Image (cartoon, rainbow, N blue to C red):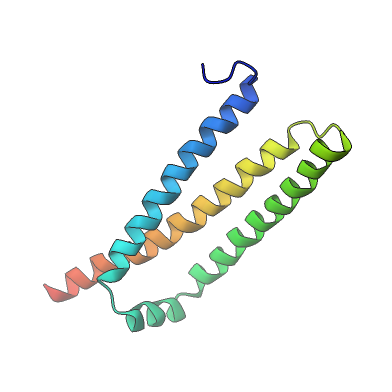
Amino acid sequence: MINSNLDFISFFIWLYNIGAAFIILFLIFQILLISRKLDTNIIRARLFLNMHIMNETWKYITIASAAFAVNAITGFLRFNVDKKVYYLWEISEIIFLAAFIAMIYQWYQFVGGMIIKNKKVDE
């Protein structure tokens, strides 16, 4: 075991953070590879026509921002004031990463769908 002082929740959060980091890096790398093949004007035009993507992105950004704020406040209370926050700090980490991954995955689907549509048009 890496650290014997970890309880079950802390160990789960530690594993979750590592898994989330790999997922985020993979999706961002894929988006960058796919977007190199696309024209930026096409991306802008499709994005302009599909406002659902922008609305969903802002929803995920809002959720992630709120979770980040809760994490910062509970982290301050936990480490500086010695208040009991009852895993609220860890839960806010999970919510932040889940919202961030959902946003990145949505963009991955949007950009990846454009590659598939372009291939069908070229054929």
Vertical order, 107 against 15 (above or below) = below
Above or below 114: residue 8: above
Residue 6: quarter of image: top right
Of the 4 image quadrants, the one containing the C terminus is bottom left
* Residue located 80% across and 37% down the image: 79
Image quadrant where residue 110 sits? bottom left
Percent x, y of residue 43: 37, 77
Number of numbered discs on residues? 0
The outermost residue toward the left is 123
Residue at horizontal 64 percent and vertical 25 percent from the top: 9
Q: Quadrant of residue 47?
A: bottom left
x and y percentages locating residue 76 in the rendered image: 80, 44
Q: Does 11 sit above or below residue 111? A: above
Residue appearing at x 43%, y 62% in the figure: 107
Q: Nearer the viewer, residue 103 or 36?
A: 36
Closer to the camera in the image, 116 or 41: 41
Closer to the camera in the image, 9 or 77: 77
The reply, left or right, for residue 115 in relation to residue 70 is left
- The picture places residue 112, in percent across and down from the top left corner, at 31, 62
Name the residue rendered at 14%, 75% in the picture. Answer: 122
Residue 101 is situated, as x and y percent measured from the top left of the image, at 50, 51
Q: Nearer the viewer, residue 35 or 114?
A: 35
